[in-house]
Image (cartoon, rainbow, N blue to C red):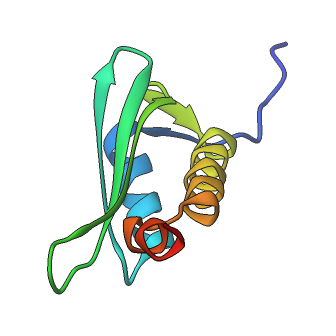
Amino acid sequence: MKPVSNTTKVTFPNACQLMRWHFHPMGFEATMDAPRSMIARLFDRASGETVIAIAGIPCATVMTTTEVARIIQSVEDELESFVPPQAWQELA
């Protein structure tokens, strides 16, 4: 008998919806830029201005919810380490 897995799998569009809900009220969009990677963009919904865009995030067309959580954590980590261009100008 085959063991039963408790891991839920979602398609790429459904994973993107989970990420949209997670990052709300910020806007979130993602596209696959290669068979195993994606580009994610967080943006201000009011102005449409991009807050951060990240390329090369590992992903698949079908992912587990654990993999989606890993992508969310990667985006959050990148966002925390992000220094806006205005801050660079103030440092110069």
Q: Residue at x 47, y 77 (%)?
A: 90
Q: Is residue 61 visible?
A: no
Using the rendered image of the protein, determine whether residue 79 is visible from the camera's viewpoint.
Answer: yes
Q: Residue at x 53, y 71 (%)?
A: 91
In the image, residue 19 above or below residue 35:
below
Vertical comparison of 76 with 34: above or below:
below
Residue at 84 percent of width and 22 percent of height:
3
Q: Quadrant of residue 36?
A: top left
43 left or right of 89? left
Is 55 on the left-hand or right-hand side of 66?
left
Front position in the image: 37 or 82:
82
- Quadrant assignment, res 63: top right
Q: Is residue 46 left or right of residue 29?
A: left
Image location of residue 74, percent across then percent down: 62, 48
Which residue is farthest front? 92
In the rendered image, residue 87, in percent from the top left (x then y), is placed at: 48, 73
Q: x, y (%) of residue 25?
A: 38, 84
Q: On the rendered image, what quadrant is the N terminus found in?
A: top right
Percent of width and height locating residue 47: 14, 81
Q: As drawn, is 19 to the left or to the right of 9?
A: left
- Residue beneath the point at 15% across and 73% down: 48
